[in-house]
Amino acid sequence: MDGHLNFWKGKRVLLTGHTGFKGTWMSVMLENLGAEICGYSLPLSKSSFYYKVSPNIKYHVEGDISDEKKVFQTIDAFQPEIIIHLASHSSLEGSTKIPDFILRTNFMGCMNVLEASRKLECIKAVVIVTSDKCYQNMETDEPYVEDSPLGAKDPYSTSKVCQELLTSCYEDTFLGKEGKNIGIATARASNVIGAGDYNISRLMPYLLDSYLNDNVPQIRNPYAIRPWQFVLDVLYGYLLLTKKLYESSGITSEYNGAYNFGPREDGFVQVGEVAQMVGRCFENATFIQKEAKDHIRQETQVLKLDSSKAQKVLNWKPQKSLEEAVSLTVDFVKKEKMGIETARLCREQVDSYLEGVR
């Protein structure tokens, strides 16, 4: 195994939200790389992607990320070197119905992780995964860079801005150069595409659910430009970032801060183009446009990310084009429907991806 991946062998990693869409893929990647994982998440559903894949995680803790006492007890008992915080409520459209839950989960959950990092001596690196939705809507074709203004107009995006500000506060006050000198950063990723995402409030799972069941999807904002990329590209970026933070912990804080993880140039396309791309995999299935609700009209029409920092500092770059990401995802779900085991398909994709970046 190449050195940059061999780093993970034997590392004690606390992974929050490990049973979610990205959490499941990350669990399998870390399992593949030989890390010792403690996962913390809400009770597991038997219909979940995680249940079907069943990653080999020795420590599985069920709990609410907003439960300060349980979060601390879990982290203290496991004594991780690394925390990757994925636990989050991640639906923009649904956030207006339950804003208190969104803010409590995303803000308080983040604070609980940071508080444990402040109090415990074992932790060397912390990555807080936020979102590209943290940027102030500037309605510009220019890609957002890490020091672009933050801002929000809906509960979900607000919770992500809060996570960014809270992490910056803890870094400056407790964990960074003025405190314990822990390696700490936020990761701002674009819309990710991959099998196992069952949240049909998001575009890709909604399209797949519609086309697989011979329904015509209704798209609320087909002309909006968004960044789209393969899920394993993003997670590989998180791994590189975590490694860099760990290795600089106690030495320098120069790698702390925020990092964008966006796609190749071909990944900045309209929502409708993605729908057409997926539709071509289902005998040119089509879609119709639906009227957007008021709060959705506040969404920016153009959202692009500049990932130059991650490329320069971490030597990270997306391995897959948008076409490849869509093809890999559709191929996965079609094989699932044919009866091939989800766990096998997942591990084969992870094995193939990691082999490509060794």
Image (cartoon, rainbow, N blue to C red):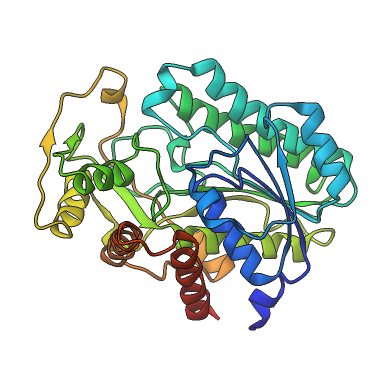
Residue 194 falls in which quadrant of the image?
bottom left
* Residue at 29%, 25% in the rendered image: 296
Looking at the rendering, in which quadrant would you find the N terminus? bottom right
Residue 298: x and y, percent?
Answer: 30, 24
Q: Which one is in front, 29 or 337?
A: 337
**Quarter of the view holding residue 10:** bottom right
On screen, residue 32 above or below 293: below
Quarter assignment of residue 111: top right
Quadrant where the C terminus lies? Answer: bottom right
Q: Residue drawn at (79%, 51%), measured in percent from left and top? A: 182
Q: How far from the left and from the top, in percent, is residue 30?
A: 64, 63
Q: Is residue 282 above or below residue 112?
A: below
Q: Residue furthest front?
A: 339
Q: Is residue 329 left or right of residue 358?
A: left
Q: Is residue 180 visible to us here?
A: no
Q: Is residue 306 above or below residue 112?
A: below
Task: From the top left corner, tell me how far across and down residue 191 is, in percent.
Answer: 38, 48
Count the marks: 0
Residue at x-position 45% and y-position 69%: 349
Pick out the residue farthest to the right. Answer: 121
Q: Considering depth in this image, is 159 or 232 the residue closer to the camera?
A: 232
Taking 273 as reference, is 24 left or right?
Answer: right
Residue found 58% across the figure and 66% down from its top: 313
Residue 28 place in picture, x, y as percent: 58, 62
**Could you tell me if residue 241 is visible in this image?**
yes
